[in-house]
Image: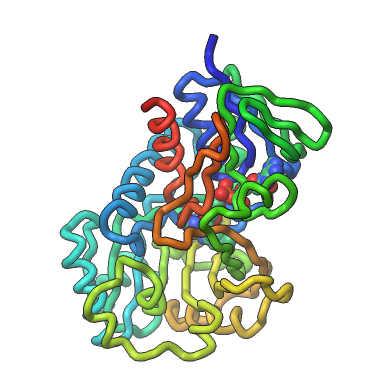
Amino acid sequence: MSERVVIVGGGVIGSLHAWEAVERGYEVVHLEADAEPRGATVRNHGLVWLTGRARGRDLDLALRARRRWAEIAGATGVTLRASGGLTVLYTEAEEAVARQAAELDGGRREFRVVDAEEARRINPALGGTFRAALHSPYDAILEPREVLPRLRAELRAREGYQWHGGRTAVDFAAGRVVDDLGHTHAGDRVIFCVGARREGVSARLLADAPLRRVRQQLVQTEPMDITVTTAVSDSLSLYYYPAYDVPARAALPRREPFDERHGVKLTISQRRGGEVTIGGAHLYDEPFDFAALEECDRRVIDRAERVLGRPLGRIARRWTGTYPTTLDGRGYVRREVTTGVTLVTAVVLGMTVAPAVAEETFEVFAA
Ligand SMILES: Cc1cc2nc3c(=O)[nH]c(=O)nc-3n(C[C@H](O)[C@H](O)[C@H](O)COP(=O)(O)OP(=O)(O)OC[C@H]3O[C@@H](n4cnc5c(N)ncnc54)[C@H](O)[C@@H]3O)c2cc1C
């Protein structure tokens, strides 16, 4: 008889664990508190974003995940656009950071610093005036609101997979989970992938986990009459991401205090329907302000218009999303909570690396 695993959490981390489990011949019982997941996974940019990853283990994980996403997309029909990414640079000091990052990368990401003309050949939507751009060809774009339903449709067609939407796990012990309807779900293993949700049993699980939560705010336009062929960011990201931890970074001027305080950085990705998603400000101090700040949106919209060299379409949607991230620079947290019960959370850029994290979990189980 095959082993059974109970997975709690229907976001990308839980769903990719379910995928990996089914591929390896486990029976899977999959619980999700909401009828349809509404967490970080459906609120994100959809970027499989290698550009900013730290060299070393972080990058290894992301490259592995990128290959795995291509396989999963092939098997499930999930849309994965091999778009590449461009980080737009305005000054000599910014270009120096990008050049050093490319040099230190040693060709693993095939980074290239290109001039503005070449950047526009790669992405004709970049109509603004800028100096150069860092091209990262392996970046890719998923459709955040399509991934989970597609994966689930494919899983449900497989034998041995059960989905229980609208069931909150309220208690657990070795080999079992109890849901809010009082049903007990037994398994040889239990995996909690509960994201940032801090209620009931999830709060208990996350209470002493080494993580902090981040709230991000972003906007989306109505469908636009341009094609943004790549993921796009700009030089504000040089201040944040470990890939840019190079000597030349010390020569960058300080950011504007507002941008620094609100973690403002630009990310642009276009949806299949033509809408352009633009983010975002990041809050790190809890309790988070319950309001979304207009000034944060205005700043990223200004930056996006500068890159695109044209006004954006009307903003049709605004939202925030919260995700957990590690405190100590590790790529994610996996810990055994009690015998046979594993917590996987705080996955940094979880949409990017979820498939590789899931593979690693089952490799640990098999070891
Ligand atoms: C605005 C924004 C933009 C982002 N952009 C990107 C990006 O472009 N690329 C990238 O790689 N990452 C991005 N991220 C991060 C990425 O979205 C997250 O790392 C990832 O989605 C986390 O997945 P998850 O499954 O852990 O969490 P979630 O998607 O939040 O899923 C957790 C699920 O667990 C369920 N759950 C919790 N407790 C229980 C319980 N007790 N019982 C049953 N179910 C429970 C919740 O209801 C939820 O559906 C972004 C995040 C945000 C918010």
| Residue 117: % across, % down | 26, 76
| Residue 310: % across, % down | 49, 81
| Residue toward you, 229 or 112 | 112
User: Please, which residue is most extreme toward the top here?
Assistant: 1
Q: How many marks?
A: 0
| 202 horizontally vs 97: left or right | right
| Residue 69: % across, % down | 41, 41
| 73 horizontally vs 14: left or right | left
Quick check: 118 above or below 305?
above
Location of residue 105 (image quadrant):
bottom left
Question: Can residue 34 be seen here?
Answer: yes
Location of residue 121 (image quadrant):
bottom left
Quick check: 196 above or below 95?
above
Question: Can residue 144 be seen here?
Answer: no
Residue at figure coordinates x 45%, y 23% from the top left = 24
| Residue toward you, 165 or 125 | 165
Looking at the rendered image, the quarter that the C terminus falls into is top left
| Residue 103: % across, % down | 16, 67
Residue at figure coordinates x 63%, y 67% from the top left = 222
Residue at figure coordinates x 39%, y 35% from the top left = 71
Looking at the picture, the colour scheme in use is: rainbow
User: Please, which residue is most extreme toward the right here?
Assistant: 181
Residue at figure coordinates x 69%, y 54% from the top left = 198
Looking at the rendered image, the quarter that the N terminus falls into is top right
| Residue toward you, 7 or 103 | 7
| Residue toward you, 4 or 166 | 4
Location of residue 43 (image quadrant):
bottom right
